[in-house]
Image (cartoon, coloured by chain):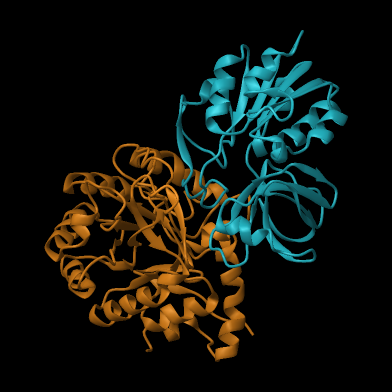
Chain colours: A cyan, B orange
Amino acid sequence: MEKQLYTITENRLVAADTYRLVLSGKGKVDGEFVHLEIPGFYLRRPLSVCDSEEGRFTLLYKTVGEGTKVLATLPEGTQLSVLTGLGRGFDASACSRSALLVGGGLGAAPLYLLAKELKRQGKKVTVVLGFNKADEIVLANEFKALCDGFAIATLDGSVGVKGFVTDAIKGMAGLDYDYFYTCGPMIMMKVVCEALSGPGEASLEERMGCGAGFCYGCSVQTQNGPRRVCKDGPVFKKEEILW
Amino acid sequence: MVKDLSVNLCGKSLRNPVVPASGTFGFGLELADSFDLNVLGGISLKGSTREARYGNPVPRIAEAQSGMLNAVGLQNPGIDVLVNSKVPALRKIYNGCVIANISGFSLDEYRECCAKADTCEGIDIIEVNISCPNVHNGGMAFGTNPNAAAEVTKAVREVCSQKPVFIKLSPNVTDIVAIARACENAGADGLTLVNTFLGMRIDIARRKPILANTTGGYSGAAIFPIALRMVYQVAHACSIPVMGCGGVTSARDVLEMMMAGATAVQVGAENLRNPFACPEIIEALPLEMERLGIQDIKEIIKTV
């Protein structure tokens, strides 16, 4: 874990109530999520890393609470204190040749970083994303450009398959994968983990204190006893999760 | 100019007065990769009970103005894991003052846990939590009544022949001085105060408490003046050493707490928003002392 100041180089609306935040600073950020200090708020906010390159990384966030609403008002050039190197992320090496990535809403964000890594390792990547409606869609073009297969489901049917991600998956002819990864609302991940055969992993979410594994504020019960979402996760094997 | 930051707690010398508070620093090991723990004057380890506990359901954390609420509920692997595994592992990388924090739901549990801590080589001080407001079936009752507080103190004092016993006090009481005196008279070697203030937050959109436990302990910068007042009152009413705790966020807060009467100062919630809070405070202390004309930090204890 490291604490550093990063500078906002982009903070703009990209979908309904959804912002893309690019932060610049030294080095390449690793870890599954960063813990962001928002001026005027006591606790940091954990946000999944969507993309990371030398000198900059990208986050997507939705303005759901007071903290993210303030975050959305911060102009380019603002410096933020960021804890990096946090969380145990997706295990790209668990997939031997072909991966299925299933995201719901902003759960798509960390899957993008995973998809890049899987492609770097020469694996086939199929992505299925679910949203409530068209104006909430994020990262569709980025995934299309990167991956071997891509489908979208919207609840209102405004784009892609009408229904849930599982409906879109059913509609994909000849879908072939040896490992799946999912991130999104708990109920969606539960359904995905129960519906999909074969091994896979899911990224959990919980209110956090420290974000670095020492306050035990985000411990959840698992098949293997209590586990800290921030440190032992957020990604867990599907068999380990108690839905 | 070289400043003397060392303090003495019941015969144990600390290289400086800064100690991460129990529950805000795990077992120390979780932070070992982030900075050299040996800069710390001491470490108060996560509270331990006789058996392993999962604690409360999530959400366990809620935000508040200048602070936060927690209802972790004493998640811990149990006293045997503490003394046989956590402390020995910490000792391999840390040579400062190790404080074992003990909780219990009965006098027997306090006795049994404290006896095990007393014979554990790596532990320097035993801190007995009689105040944790997060757990329904215990804690609160002992810490909120002078007689019950004295009873726990006497019980643990009987089984601790080797190590100093500090009693950690709850602030959720009408007269903290009466409880402090009762603990001192019952044989406490020192006092730690304060624990968190019982609080609550509601999610007004869902019309439900944010914490699964409904209530939780409020800590953070907001409570500093109240904690300081209590440290001042207790330190001036008792003659045993006090570890001051509550809302400390800076080197200036440390000095203020010591002037009020604290021999050592614990940093709690601030660690959660800044895991590097303790080393940063310790680094800032000499300069702050220089500004105020303080050569030896011990000189300022209870000078107000």
Query: Relative to residue B147, is residue B258 drawn left or right?
Result: right
Residue occupying the point 40% across, 71% down: B223
Taking depth in this image into account, of B153 and B179 the one nearest to the observer is: B179
In which quadrant will I find the C terminus of chain B?
Answer: bottom left
How far from the left and from the top, in percent, is residue A138?
A: 74, 39
Query: Relative to residue A42, is residue B144 drawn left or right?
Result: left
Rendering quarter of residue B295: bottom right
Rendering quarter of residue A182: top right
Query: Relative to residue A106, is residue B134 drawn left or right?
Result: left
Q: In this view, does A84 lie above or below A197?
A: below
Which residue is outermost to the bottom?
A: B293
Is any atom of residue B36 visible in this view?
no
Is any atom of residue B203 visible in this view?
yes
How far from the left and from the top, in percent, is residue A184?
A: 61, 33
How far from the left and from the top, in percent, is residue B151?
A: 14, 58
Residue occupying the point 63% across, 19% down: A166
In which quadrant will I find the N terminus of chain B?
Answer: bottom right
Q: In this view, does A220 lie above or below A192?
A: below
Taking depth in this image into account, of B187 and B236 the one nearest to the observer is: B236
Which residue is outermost to the top?
A: A174
Q: In this view, does B52 lie above or below B275?
A: above
Residue occupying the point 64% across, 18% down: A167
Q: How many numbered discs? A: 0
How far from the left and from the top, in percent, is residue B75?
A: 38, 43
Q: Is residue A122 above or below residue A18?
A: above
Taking depth in this image into account, of A146 and B262 the one nearest to the observer is: A146
